[in-house]
């Protein structure tokens, strides 16, 4: 299958393919993370709002969030003001530390 790549500046989201290739994550978790990275910074990041814009129940969204927290793509216990797009830099800077903590917990 051919892949056509076009450079765009509006209406597109640039994100790492690292989590998309992670075989330990479900498709639901990958989709939720991709979607949250594409939303604006001032968007209401609550389980209820994420459920409203998807065909998933709040419990299904919660399960995907837990999965992303377990894999350290979302940091657990973050304040409600956390936004994955602007705060991902801090996560990337601490990626090695997160991997070590995750390995100890496994």
Image: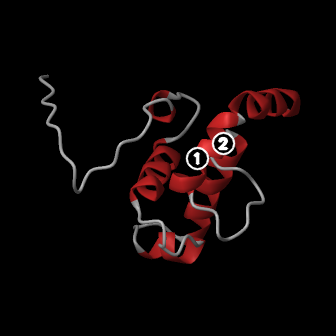
Going by the picture, which residue comes out furthest to the right?
Answer: 104
Q: Position of residue 15 (x, y in %)?
A: 41, 40
Residue at screen point 12% across, 23% down: 2
Q: How is the image coloured?
A: secondary structure
Left or right side of 31 for 63 = right
| Element at label 2 | helix
Q: Residues within 10 Å of mark 2 (few under 14, many from 20)?
A: some
Which disc number belongs to residue 88? 1
Q: Which mark is residue 9?
A: none
Locate the N terminus and report the quarter of the image it occupies. top left
Quarter of the image that includes the C terminus: top right
Q: Position of residue 71 (x, y in %)?
A: 67, 38
Q: Is residue 42 positioned above or below 87 on the image?
A: below
Is 20 placed above or below 75 here? Answer: above
Q: CA distance from mark 2 to mark 1?
A: 5 Å
Q: Residue at x 26, y 50 (%)?
A: 12
Disc tally is: 2
Circle 1 SS class: helix
Q: Is residue 65 left or right of residue 42?
A: right
Q: Image check: 11 left or right of 22?
A: left
Residue 41 in picture, x, y percent from top left: 48, 66
Q: Position of residue 48 (x, y in %)?
A: 55, 77
Q: Residues within 10 Å of mark 1 (few under 14, many from 20)?
A: some
Residue 84, image quadrant: bottom right
Tell me what residue is drawn at x 79 percent, y 31 percent: 97
Residue name at image x 68 percent, y 53 percent: 66
**Most extreme residue toward the top, as rendered?**
1
Circles 2 and 1: CB atoms closer than 8 Å? yes
Q: Which residue is mark 2?
A: 91
């Amino acid at each position: 299958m051919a892949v056509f790549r076009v450079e765009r500046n509006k209406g597109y989201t640039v994100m790492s393919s690292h989590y998309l290739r992670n075989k330990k994550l479900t498709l639901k978790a990958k989709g939720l993370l991709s979607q949250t990275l594409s939303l604006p910074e001032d968007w209401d990041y609550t389980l209820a709002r994420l459920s409203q814009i998807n065909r998933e129940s709040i419990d299904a969204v919660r399960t995907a969030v837990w999965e992303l927290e377990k894999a350290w793509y979302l940091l657990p216990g973050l304040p409600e003001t956390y936004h994955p797009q602007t705060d991902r830099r801090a996560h990337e800077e601490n990626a090695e530390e997160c991997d070590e903590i995750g390995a100890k917990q496994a």
